[in-house]
Amino acid sequence: MLRDGTFYCRAWVPTDVAPTFGGTLVVTSLRTKDLKIAKYRLARKTVELEDQFERVRSERDTANHISVLQRTEGDFFALAKRYGVEVAEREIVAQANFFDQASSDPKRLWSGDLIILPTAADYGHGETDAFTHFDRLVAEGDLGVGIAYLQRFRVRRRIGDLTRMRATGQPG
């Protein structure tokens, strides 16, 4: 969408998410008048919105699971196991989708368009130009190994985020 020469992202909120998300339409400025930059930012914004929608669904599902757990304390372990299986299945699907996207368009992967790439700071290096294990994998050029590493990195980052949230009492 173009308004006064500036590009905007306009996205409909899925109907299952809209009541919780707070609306049915999201309009956000891409803060550029350059078409090439707008296309790049639109792709990233679309992924961000999909992640937000998925988080809303996940939080809603988690709230539903919690209410079910409160009602059926005697069946806690069966519910926890079922929820664990659901989470594992969603993670497998997410990993398969990521692998498909990354292997079909490696440029998007290496540009950081599909996933946040690790930096030297993620390894505890103070220098921004420190050579890391990830840099070595990229230099070797084995796409499959690089993708597997990035998936493990993403999961470790998410586990760290969840651990911090749990320690501070924030919902995950």
Image: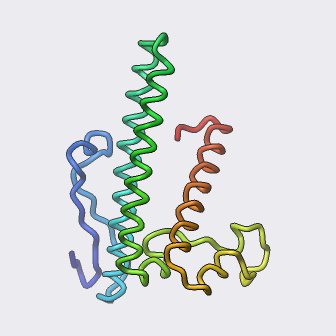
How many numbered circles does the render carry? Answer: 0
Q: Quadrant of residue 87?
A: top left
Q: Position of residue 73 (x, y in %)?
A: 48, 12
Q: Position of residue 71 (x, y in %)?
A: 42, 13
Q: How is the image coloured?
A: rainbow
Residue 159 to residue 33: above or below: above
Name which residue lies at 36% across and 69% down.
100
For the N terminus, the image quarter is bottom left
Q: Name the side, left or right, on which 142 lies relative to 102.
A: right
Residue 33 to residue 170: above or below: below
Name which residue lies at 33% across and 81% down.
38
Q: Position of residue 164 (x, y in %)?
A: 66, 45
Which residue reaches farthest top? 74
Q: Name the side, left or right, on which 55 lies relative to 119.
A: left
Q: Position of residue 77 (x, y in %)?
A: 51, 21
Q: Identify which residue, 161 or 103, lies in the foreground.
A: 103
Q: Identify which residue, 16 or 104, lies in the foreground.
A: 104
Name which residue lies at 28% across and 44% down.
17
Q: Identify which residue, 32 or 55, lies in the foreground.
A: 55
Name which residue lies at 32% across and 45% down.
21
